[in-house]
Image: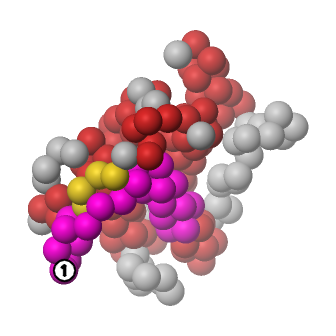
Amino acid sequence: MQQHLRQMARNNAWANETLFGAVCALSDTALRTQRPSFFGTLPRLLNHIYAVDLYYLDAAQQGGRGRSVFERTDVADMVELAGLQAMQDRALIDFCDGLTAQMLATHVPTERPDGMTSEALGRLLLHVFQHQVHHRGQAHGMLSQAGVNPPQLDDFFLEYGRVPSAERYWEEMHDA
């Protein structure tokens, strides 16, 4: 499972980088236009993804910040948010690179709106990646609604058709 999570962390970083490449090319009007989704606009959706990543990585690392990570102002500038997301993605890669089988079975405290719970670290990380995929799919649809040809975000794992921009993440994993 550790190898799978290492791969997922890199897929996640690559997909976010690719998605932000398309988002950052949009006009301010296109960015701020309300579109059908959970969050209405691309900036609100992408800020949600970033905040949830902060939350779950903090829980995984037992950083103690808990739900306070949500007490933040959304980042309006998409280039700035892309940089913050890239740093968060790098932190997640580094964390996943250090995982052991024993760590994955460990339960980590997780602060919820109604109190503290705990989650098995391996399942918590799987949820982080599923959450990302779920919301990137919404962003993909919102880009289509904006008249933009959305980037292909699923050409990472297979050798056939893997986009060149994904190769550096694979090479890095084999070098680590």
Identify the residue at image location x=13%, y=50%: 64
x then y, percent, for residue 170: 64, 26
Location of residue 48 (image quadrant): bottom left
x then y, percent, for residue 168: 61, 24
- The N terminus, quarter of image: top right
What secondary structure prevails in the magenta region?
helix
Q: Classify residue 172 as left or right of residue 111.
A: right
Tell me the magenta residue range. Answer: 111-136
> Please, what secondary structure does the residue beneath circle 1 have?
loop
Q: Nearer the viewer, residue 159 or 124?
A: 124
Identify the residue at image location x=37%, y=46%: 106
Q: Nearer the viewer, residue 46 or 30?
A: 46
Residue 53 drawn above or below residue 167: below
Q: Which residue appears farthest toward the right when viewing the image?
A: 160
Q: Nearer the viewer, residue 150 or 176?
A: 176
x then y, percent, for residue 13: 50, 41
Write down the residue under mark 1.
Answer: 114
